[in-house]
Amino acid sequence: MASAAPTKLYADDVSLVVVLIDTNPFFWTTSEKNSSSLSFADFISHVLPFLNAIMLLNQLNQVVLIATGVNSCEYIYDSSLPHQQSADGKMPAFYSEILTKLEQFVSKDQRLAKNDSSLTMSSLLSGSLSLALCYIQKIFRAGPLHPQPRILCLQGSPDGPEQYVGIMNAIFSAQRSMIPIDSCVLGTQNSAFLQQASHITGGIYQKPAYPDGLFQYLSAVFATDLQSRSFLRLPKPPGVDFRASCFCHKKTIDMGYICSVCLSIFCKHHKKCSTCGSNFNQSQQDASSTLDHKRKTPEA
Amino acid sequence: MPQVKIIAKNFMDMVAALPAMKLDKLYDNAFICEAVLRSLPPLAKKYVMQMLYIDVSVTAKSLEEQVLPDGFSKHKVAIDRLLQLRIFVQSIDRKRETSYKLNPKFQDNLQKYLVYGGSLPREPMPTNITVRLPSPEELEAYAVDQWENFLLQLVTSAQGEKQMGFSSHLLKNFQRGLMSSRENESPKMSEHGFQFLLMDTNAQLWYIIREYISSAQDRGLDPTDLISFLLELSFHVMGEAYNMNSLTEVQTSAVKDLADLGLVKLQQGRKESWFIPTKLATNLSVSLSDTSARKQGFVVIETNFRMYAYSSSKLHCEILRLFARVEYQLPNLIVGAITKESLYNAFENGITGEQIISFLQLNAHPRVAEKIPSVPENVTDQIRLWETDRNRVEMIPSHFYDDFPSKDVFEAACDYAREIGGFLWEDSNKMRLIVRGEAHQDMRDFLRRQK
Amino acid sequence: MAVVNMRAKYKVNTKTPGVPGVLKMTDEKFTFNPNDPRTSAKLDVGFRSIKGHKFSKEGSKLALLNLTLEEGGYIFEFDNFSDRNTCRDFVAKVLGKLQTVSSGKEDAKVVSEKPVPLFDEQLSTAEMERRMKLLQEDSELQKLHKQFVMSGVLTEAEFWATRKKLLNSEASRSSKQRVGFKSTMLADVRPLTDGRTNKVTFSLTPEIIHQIFAEKPAVHQAFLKFVPNKMTEKNFWTKYCRAEYLHRTKNSLAAAAEAAEDEELAVFLKHDDILASEARRKIRRVDPTLDMAADVGDDYLHLPDHGILRDGIKESNDAEHEHYKRTLSQDLNRHAAVVLEGRTLDVELGDTRTVAEALARSKQGELSAEASDDNASWRQSERVSRMTEIEDLQGPRGLPIASLCIKDPRDYFDSQQANALRALGDAGGGPKAANCDLSPEKAFESLSQQILKLKAVGLDDPIVKPEVSLKVMNTLAQPSGDKFFLGKDSQDEVLDRLPHGTREELLHHWKSIEELLRHFWSSYPITTAYLYAKVDRLKDALSKTYPKLEALRDSMQSDYRNQVGLLVRPMLQAVDAALAHAESEKRSTKTGARPNGLS
């Protein structure tokens, strides 16, 4: 038939990619000294063309860049906002715009660090994940026609255990809204948080073996739109560590004690729950004495 | 049932049909690479991205290995497309293993694009030279106006009215497919023409552009130039003014034709002249993929078959007249009714019921478009019923076979007929079989072999 | 230790009257002491010599129990069946136990040396049957039962103690359903006419009489009053049938006339006063919050030409003799009410008199129960007040909730962070060391410089070297390494890949270890000697699992051995943990004070 059914304004492969980049200065300076890993400049020069590539693939594709700092997070770039089109020949206009914004962000992050003297190794991943989810929610609520959103975490610094609750909450809300979280870990260790995030939300987890080929990972794996993913055999993580960590020593444990009131996990028996203050000892004695009553004792 | 002949073919099909030399030449232009990449199916885009920085051939097997079983058909489509468009260059080595490599020009252009960004095809003119540029609304109104004017001309000239100021060679080209002009008769709209009118704007635009390009050869032009210019045009910023001096001779004449269609607006300054691309032009690359900007609808159909069209456009009136009885016209309203007679008239002209229904649905007034269904069900059903009324008896030229020597031969013949798709009817008791006429030769050969 | 004492008569055979006395049964033996010490019927027999037991059917003439020997046996007659059943169940249990022990061959010796104290709970046959049924239905359970209970690792009671839920659900399923009234109406009591004479025959069965009593309290009342003082039962029913006949023929005039003559007959013809009062009582108990307006429209009877056909004749409204008429709807409602109430009598149907009396008793009971149910009226009034409450005048109706006390979460998170940092330091000196000599200022500075540099120089072209790209693409194309199988999915896959037999065996091992561990851990803390013995038993059984698991692993082909090893490891670890716990516990009890309850 010549006249087609009403054409969809958004094809299935139109995507909104929210990219979270780690701007943890401690990670990047240590990483720089390591010959096998990337410097921040290298990292950015892999990421920017990736953003450009996403937008090249479909003119309706949308890209949002969020910086994950040590003390703050911020939107760096949103392709849906009007931008200057001109290029200076060296690089596209939006590259330099992003770089300028990034520099401003880093100095702001530094200023905030001075106020708070505590030294943290990890970046505020929970914060930037929340920002990303908020942005996507805004898109969802704007109307029924929207691109397929996904989140890509480019993380270098190690997990911040203090953010455990925040990150898990973000993961679960992403799962509820069916937003996959892809993760690409550039640090030396696997990130348990991101492993779980990608596993739960159905995203892809990668820890590049060759950091200098980052762009190839990004373009070959992470640039794939959600629809095409259902047809492809994409790299699967070897395994996800689901074991829980105890609340007292942060040890990963197979078997442990669980507070019956607040579900805190401990590796050893405690008299009192350190989280909610429930008294275990009392109840245990009670239990054993009632057990005495219940168990029929043989006549001696 | 008349088969629909006009298919709003993808623009890229035309590009893909170009000879290899010309295609390679097209890829010199970075915009073409960009536009072509965007037109690809998602999986093909993924393969291009994956191969972007690979400078050696990659075996077809290694690509196939990535595909899950249910995605295999999509994979085939993607690879075929990439080969057609010569984005993948195929090579077969001694071990008869197929491997692909990205077209070097294409690859180079995309790599450059990623690092240095896309530049604009040409700089817009500074605002101090260009005066009284139209606002986006004005521009849009202009584009719609021009386009409708053009369509109206197609319709009215069919009714023998005097032509307006269109370049006649252009019009003639378009009319070639849509009008049937017999000798000693004023040209009459063919069934293709009627179908064309009911298509949505994007499909119409494609059709016209396609005709335009294919007619370019007759005028002694290289279609490659036109294609690349049209694609280039779609990367211009809508509403900005561009200097005519920056165009080649071919392009200048093309721009003038395109202005007639409403793709660009021409303006004349004191010294210079410039052209302003309209939405129709910038959508050209959008329409390469399957998206289209929706126009606001205007038709309300009631369950009593009355039709109210809120439009002052003469074209709309003409289109509605194709299948409805227009009763009266107010300044902004056309009132009519869908009757059996008016529909029969449309069916005579080769318009199908489905086309009418989808036209009504596509152009439903916003107030009724929210409702489901936007066109009352009794009306759509009645249109279909009236249409099938005309098709109660279907004639198929066929051949009748009987006197089969044995049941086995009869059954083998039935199976064979099914196999070649010519089977129509059988009576296994009396061993009689009816097969489509075109399959007769095959059947005869087959039966002879049976003996 | 369980002992059953029961009065019984000892009989040599069923014909003799028997010697009255007391039967005493223990786990080991049973003794019979005759009331008359002079008789020689004294018995003292160990259960070991008993081969089986028989008993008379419930409801038969005598409540008998026969404990059979190889030849002959001991027959006891009990006063009633419930006494007999207690003894029968006990015997069944003891015999069952003895049989399992003897079938356990070598284990039997162990068990008999230190007889495990069991059967402190009385098992009814129903309970036994339930267990048997469960075992039959669930082969997995049967396997475990055979493995542990039969071999004496666990006692029957211990085994089932952890499966109370199963038993309960089984029990609730098998609860007996009582037979109610038929839902057909009494219209079945049709008069039979032979056509030649004017004689009309009604046939009444005890079943029907019971139903009549239940549905027509007036008849019931009259029966109690008149029979047998004033008239015979036969007379009574004749009168009743006559009244029924009058109703049926719709001869309300005749009915009125006859009622005037015969006051007994009138009882049957008039409206049932008891019913009426009962109805009134019910109406009073109707939930006042019920929305009666909802059914108002359902009544079509007042419309002309509407009505219900009964026996082919339409009931017309005949106001005059209203008193002597019953409408079909009344009958229907009454019948429905009785059917829904159900049969509350447990008396054998047969004797009309006893049925009538029993019915009267149960009615009485109902009434008194109703009267004493103050709670109901209180609940009702509360309901009314709730339904008619005026919302803005009500106080907040929140339940008293103890709020959850969460201590300052920072306590937890701060310690977490410190731990994490420590862990990081342990992981490898690299990042930590580099970190120490780096001040935050310097770090931020270098980051900014990198950005500036990039801005000034621009991006590399090409972004990635083709050879690196190719390398990456090849690694991505490879199926990801199967070094780890930590994920849940991957473990399932491993299990699926194993040969079927191995898989079953593995699962069974896991199940049995689970069972043992469940009992093991639930015995802690050890407070009694009994538990002490139990833990000992379980420990032995657990330590026996080692060679079994190892044998299983070693029997595998090399390609599976590794995977089976992975699956077996957590089992071994769990067993290790249990045994280690038992060891440490033993040591602590040796040095420290003995747990209470043990001396």
Image: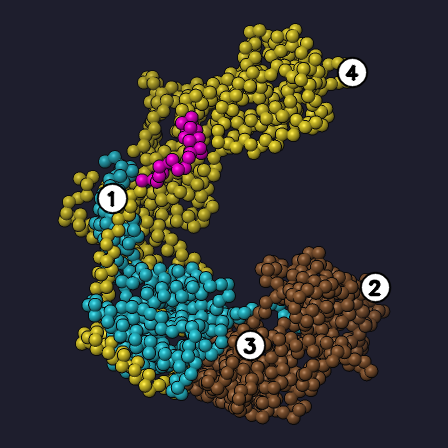
Chain colours: A cyan, B brown, C yellow
Q: Amino acid at mark 3?
A: Leu
- Residue at 39% over, 60% down: A173
Residue C508 in percent (x, y) is at: 40, 55
Is residue A222 visible in the rendered image? The answer is: yes
Q: Which residue is mark 3?
A: B139
Give the Cα separation between the discs numbered 2 and 1.
91 Å
Q: Amino acid at mark 1?
A: Ser
Which numbered disc covers residue A283? 1
Q: Which residue is mark 4?
A: C196
Disc 4 with disc 2 on a shared chain: no
Q: Which residue is mark 2?
A: B430
Residue B186 in percent (x, y) is at: 79, 80
Disc 2 with disc 1 on a shared chain: no
Residue C309 colored in magenta in the image? no
Q: Amino acid at mark 4?
A: Arg
Q: Amino acid at mark 2?
A: Lys
Give the Cα separation between the discs numbered 3 and 1.
80 Å
Whether the residues at callouts 4 and 3 have beta carbons within 8 Å, the answer is no
Whether the residues at callouts 3 and 1 have beta carbons within 8 Å, the answer is no
Residue C393 colored in magenta in the image? yes
Give the Cα separation between the discs numbered 1 and 4.
89 Å
* Front tag of 1 and 4: 1
Q: Residues within 10 Å of mark 4 (few under 14, many from 20)?
A: few
Query: Which quadrant is home to the N terminus of chain C?
Result: top left
Query: Which quadrant is home to the C terminus of chain C?
Result: top left
Seen from the viewer's position, the closer of residues C158 and B245 is B245
| Chain letter of the residue carrying label 4 | C
Residue C28 in percent (x, y) is at: 32, 34
The span picked out in magenta is C376-400
| Chain letter of the residue carrying label 3 | B
